[in-house]
Amino acid sequence: MGGVSGKLVWVLLVMCSSWLIAAVHAQQAATTDPIEVAALEAILGRWGKTTSPLWRMSGEPCRGVPVDGSTDLDGNPKNNPGIKCDCSYNSGTVCHITQLRVYALNVVGQIPAELQNLTYLTYLNLDQNYLSGPIPSFIGQLTALTELHVGFNPLSGSLPKELGNLTNLNLLGISLTNFTGELSEELGNLSKLKYLGISLTNFSGQLPEELGNLTKLRQLYTDSAGLSGPFPSTLSRLKNLKLLRASDNNFTGTIPDFIGSLSNLEDLRIGDIVNGSSSLAFISSLTSLDTLVLRNCKISGDLGAVDFSKFANLTFLDLSFNNISGNVPKSILNLQKLIFLFLGNNSLTGELPDGISPSLTNLDFSYNQLTDYSFAVDCGSNRSIRVSDNTMYELDSTNLGDSSYYVTSQTRWGVSNVGKLFQAPNDSKIIHSGEKIQNAVDSELFQTARMSPSSLRYYGLGLENGNYTVLLKFAELGFPDTPTWQSLGRRFFDIYIQGELKEKDFNIRKMAGGKSFTAVYKSYTTTVSKNFLEIHLFWAGKGTCCIPIQGYYGPLISALSITPNFSPTVRNGVPKKKSKAGAIVGIVIAASVLGSAILFGIFMVIKKRRRMAKQQEELYNLVGQPDVFSNAELKLATDNFSSQNILGEGGYGPVYKGVLPDGRVIAVKQLSQSSHQGKSQFVTEVATISAVQHRNLVKLHGCCIDSNTPLLVYEYLKNGSLDKALFGNGSIKLDWATRFEIILGIARGLTYLHEESSVRIVHRDIKASNVLLDTDLTPKISDFGLAKLYDEKKTHVSTGIAGTFGYLAPEYAMRRHLTEKVDVFAFGVVALEIVAGRSNTDNSLEESKIYLFEWAWSLYEKEQALGIVDPRLEEFSRDEVYRVIHVALVCTQGSPYQRPPMSKVVAMLTGDVEVAEVVTKPNYITEWQFRGGNTSYVTSHSGSTTPELSRQKEIDPLTQSPTITGVSHEHEGR
């Protein structure tokens, strides 16, 4: 039996070997159509590209990987440029090229005529290059195509009608291009199409009715495509549609009811309807939705009329900027998969219901008329947290000055401090602890605490009148339980609720049985009668003064919560701009901080402001009531704006150093009359800065609007600007560790502006002179006078260019395309300057080193990147410096979509994620070099203002650069 089995094995081996030899012989015998070989060689030659290492043009291109059926073309990133072949023609003797991929290789030029000879192509991917000009009409001859990707290129002109001949297409991606004209009705011939991407283009006119013929369509991207008019009724035929995005166009009329019949929709995003009024009734049948965005669609009606409990798969809901009324229904807040909920800028009223789903971690109800009946604060914490009883404790991370206060953006609660800690690091009044807290129900609430050397107040604002329970949570974090002198500290303070003394000489550690790091809870009942609650922790002079440092003795609190002892019945939310209660709240807070001696003066200022012009009234409401200084007060502080006190000259006027009567040193920005910034821009700037608070952003203390020239009052940073520290001859010496922290701090500040702030902000003028250094050399981004707010829908602006040459991203400098990637580019330049210790342009150096950016690229390509390191750095981490250089070059890629978001930049700098492996020299550098190094516009205008740009266009090598608007990578392949 064993002998028979052995013979059978040998027979099978012989047969398999024969088949294998026959297959190899057939492959060797098959030859590629010579017309296609010549065409492919011409195409790559015109684009200046060679084949990938996985296949060869010489000989037979259809050998090896191109005929390997085990992987598809996109599955191997090294196969780029790449092809796939089919050698089954003429009994296996002829190969035809069926797939061509030239993806993200910075190809410059047009689509060559030779492409029409690749008539067997089923797949063509030219995404993410710099191809310009039109799509040639011969594209209609490639009738075998099933996928056509030409997006993310500055292609222009109208779409050829011949596209309608490609009836086998199931994917057409032309997003992020410069195509113009109306969409042709021939698109309706593409009956097999499953994916159509035309986002971020410059089309005009309406969606053609013929799109209704695309009944197999599953994904339709039309956002930011320049379209107008109503939605054609024929779209009701697209029953297989799973995704529809139609935001940022000029669509008119109501959202048609037939959208509700597209019951397979999982992702629906419509926004920015020009006119008309819609309701939410049409969404009732769209129960498969995962994402629903109906932003700025002029929707009205009661939110509670929709039964949101049917939307079990919903993870993202944005109905902001409409006129939706009624209460927030519990059915929304109970959705178990919902993570993001944005209902801001509507007309919602009432109280938020209890029982929010644990998954719902991102909420916005701002600019409604919702009632506040309670609030909770995690004192000193930089993140909000939901605890075991489902209470959401809000963050409280603002580093208060010695006489200052902070009110949340929603005016729900505020906090104020009076007193100076003489030896605390950074004068910080926030304590952090990693110790395990005993006797704590939710120990995470006790990891931080806010402290004051004298007087600490928390305020509840806009509360409904009635009886409340005030729960205060303490733990002594300042004095350790160790046999050292530091354990001898004693802390005493008094507790007042609504002005009534509740605890005299309160000692946290004594209440905890003589232990530190042990939770203590104190609960009180109090009455709110004027929509206002005050909790006052006051140091009366007792306790130790110098343990562990001088001034470490005042009140300290870890968390607090305020809950009603009644069933709320009356809406009593944030006071309106002429609300008497609101004025009282503002006065009380200011008086608490600045002292009762100026109470009458503040009242008169507020009363006067109410009689001022509408613009000034808007200022108060817009910025959340910053400190308001009088012109006389600031004149006194700056010695009548003496030239001796000038700190510098910004784009909008000089900045003066000043000293207030309470000893605070300030920086006053005087907006010159010659500045283009009028009052409306002034209001915008104050609102912008007041809306953001971060340790790496310069803090705005307040403003003055009763002078002829508006004034802004900032914190004063004694170490001045980064450019003076880097390029000047001052006494500040920046070692590598400090430089790295500065780079990281700038990146974190930009991350906050772009991704974490309540409003998205593009700075537009990031440079070393706009980064200031505090006493610990912590970087703080300054000068938001050039910042522009833009909505999520905005991908470019038509305003004038703001910024400084040498830091301007090419798409912004030449085409005025503005996204956050403009700041990413400038950050990359600044990071290189910090590494090199020199400015981006230095004419005193030898020619190859004049332009830091080009020099860095030259050294990087020679694997000598560390050659740009500042010779004054005696010690530095080679790996860390190389990583920074690599990240900087990634940030300064020619196309915005190739630059990472700032959050990823931070992760790359810290080593949490790998730096992108592929870094290609930006095309505009190549063009500079190709044109003989003509970069005279940088040389002569590196510090000029932007109007000079128009006079430089004739010699500017960037004028031929493509127009590409930055968007997230989710658009890839459209």
Image (spheres, rainbow, N blue to C red):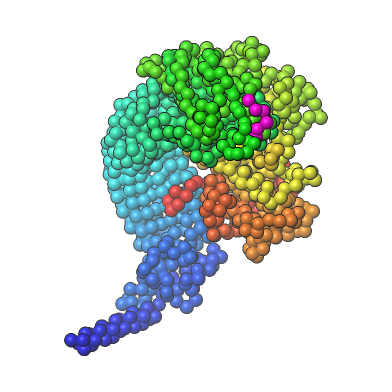
Dominant secondary structure (helix, strand or loop) of the stretch shown in magenta: loop
Residue beneath the point at 67% across and 43% down: 767
Q: Start and end of the magenta stretch? A: 543-548
Horizontally, residue 268 falls left or right of residue 4, namely right
Horizontally, residue 355 falls left or right of residue 419, namely left
Horizontally, residue 835 falls left or right of residue 752, namely right
Asked if the stretch drawn in magenta spans residue 612, the answer is no
Figure check: 673 above or below 152: above
**In x, y percent, where is residue 856?**
67, 57
**In x, y percent, where is residue 466?**
42, 14
Residue beneath the point at 56% across and 18% down: 504
The quarter in which the N terminus is drawn is bottom left
Figure check: 23 above or below 882: below
Asked if the stretch drawn in magenta spans residue 546, the answer is yes
Residue beneath the point at 30% across and 41% down: 288
Quarter residue 673 falls in:
top right
